[in-house]
Image (cartoon, rainbow, N blue to C red):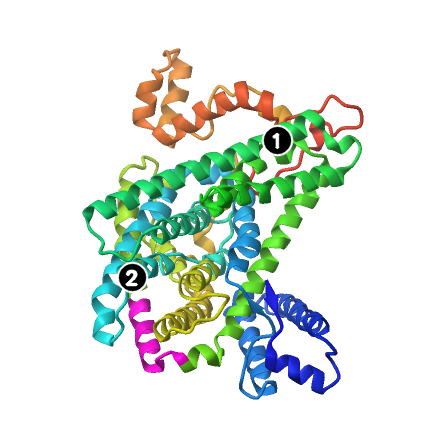
Amino acid sequence: MADYVGPLHSWLIKNGLGESVNHTLVVSISLFVTLICACIVLGHLLEEVKWASESIVSLILGVGTGFIVLIISGGKNSHILQFNEELFFIYLLPPIIFNAGFQVKKKHFFRNFASIMLYGAAGVFISFVIISFGCRYIFPHLGLHLAPRSYLALGTIFSATDTVCTLQVLSQDETPLLYSLVFGEGVVNDATSVVLFRTIQKLGTASINGLTALGMFADFIYLFLSSTVLGVAAGLLSAYIIKTLYFGRHSTDREIAIMTLMAYLSYMIAELFYLSGILTVFFCGIVMSHYTWHNVTESSRITTKHTFATMSFIAETFIFLYVGMDALDLEKWRLADKRQSFSIFGVVIALVLVSRAAFVFPLSAVANFFTRSEAGKITIRQQVIIWWAGLIRGAVSIALAFNEFTRAGSTIFPDNATLITSTIIAVLFSTVVFGMITKPLIGWLLPPHMRRPAVDSEPSSPKEANIDHTVDANLELPLLTERLQNLRNGVARRSSLRMLLEAPTSTIHRMWRSFDDAYMRPMFGGRGFVPILPGSPGPSKTLTLAGSS
């Protein structure tokens, strides 16, 4: 998984800091952990700075550290540690994606589910097609000739977004619709990109034709659905086990351990059967936050919520630090055509700008057309923010690029080295430049007087959750007004089919809530679950998770 770096090893031994390979590895890991701590401290100190975000701080610190290591090693290496690209997929991406599912505001996520899927799934395909074809027709003019599969891989690599910078600025209380769309699209985009990337990896080096494209789409649907089902099943199994056995009566450590291990197990089982572990662990996180999290003790709820968020934060910081160091990897730069790398970088950034605009604004118009409520429509200012939020490329793009174009973090092929360096430049540029502009841009597009606090209709306690509300607060405004009028006049309720056609999102949400309360929660627990065992948490002590529904 990790190896010592030869030049750094020699320098440590020369200065009496490394007596063996193992000791050098300990020193290297200690330095890396120190850097992560430094990123946390600097990110905290720069919290109020408009241009700064923790990802930008991590990148800059990584570049600075890489430069120092480069000098110490005599210009031979810029890494403290050398990692296999599988490290990204096995250890770093799972906690990031799981926490995204675990912390998601499910009420807002599923209320805007259609719009989120338009951006995160359909949008990825549009972006993938534009970037893939753009690379296919422009790269040969730059002197870079690749296999058809490589062009498709580039389409998925640069379709994966990183919305962290934007989410650090937005508030889900002041701009609930916008936050939900940006956050939801980000996690669905990552999952869809990874599934699409895995599908492309199954292709051979033959030319792509219509039949191949159809087969690829069928593989994508299979991977998407099977991975989702596995994630939901793993989440439900964890909820049933904890609800039935109630580990908390003896040890809260056991219920925290079973949640963490079953989440990671879902990912590994998906990888074992060649499915998408990223998609599996994302939906496992959603299900666990809806059922499992409410079945544990009060102290375990606090612990798991912050533990998963911390693991995700450390993994993201680790990746950005490594990317910063890798930007100065002379081995790749010696192999790569430097002029070609910067030319490809320019083309990629242009394609990202165009492909992003090609689906955000048209799909926003489609979403607004089918939205009855004016409050639920996406304004042009919000569309610009959604477009901008998806321009930044980050951890997923790096992980996919390393997986496709390197082996054990290095390559001997000049074309692959050129593509890796181009990807690193694109990630550095988009994260630092676009990230620095994000706060001022959002402040200009959404001044404080245009932000209004969200009115949360979710029950604040299990007792309220058990009340049979005559009027569902999630209904769209026109339908809600008509239902109130009908109740006053004694008019019979309309059929479910008519309500589904007139307000599909709110009607489906209400039908799901009824099904969930009647069948799912009695078996798997969830909000309002009260263990029978002595000493278990009562209904008055139920907390509200950031992603609870």
Q: CA distance from mark 2 to mark 1?
A: 42 Å
Magenta span: chief secondary structure: helix
Query: Element under label 1?
Result: helix
Quickly name the residue at label 2. Answer: 151
Question: 281 or 451: nearer the eye?
Answer: 281
Say above or below: 332 vs 495.
below
Any part of residue 227 in sight: yes
For label 2, the crowd category at 10 Å Cα-Cα, with few meaning under 14, some 14 to 19 and many 20 or more, is: many
Instruction: Name which residue type carries label 2.
Output: Tyr
Is 475 left, or right, of 93 in this rendering?
left
**Measured from the top left, where is residue 317 in percent x and y?**
57, 63
Q: Marks 2 and 1: which is nearer the front?
A: 2
For label 1, the crowd category at 10 Å Cα-Cα, with few meaning under 14, some 14 to 19 and many 20 or more, is: many
Question: 74 or 432: nearer the eye?
Answer: 74
Is 300 left, or right, of 68 in this rendering?
right
Q: What range is drawn magenta here?
A: 335-350
Any part of residue 459 in sight: no
Instruction: Name which residue type carries label 1.
Output: Ala
Residue drawn at the location 34% of the way across and 29% of the way down: 504
Say above or below: 99 vs 57.
above
* Magenta stretch encompasses residue 339: yes
Q: Quadrant of the N terminus?
A: bottom right
Residue drawn at the location 76% of the way across and 23% of the way down: 533
Q: Quadrant of the C terminus?
A: top right
Say above or below: 479 vs 183.
above
Quickly name the residue at label 1. Answer: 239
Query: Element under label 2?
Result: helix
Q: Earlier in the sequence, mark 2 or mark 1?
A: 2
Say above or below: 378 vs 405.
above
The quarter holding residue 396 reads bottom left
Residue drawn at the location 59% of the way across and 22% of the way down: 523
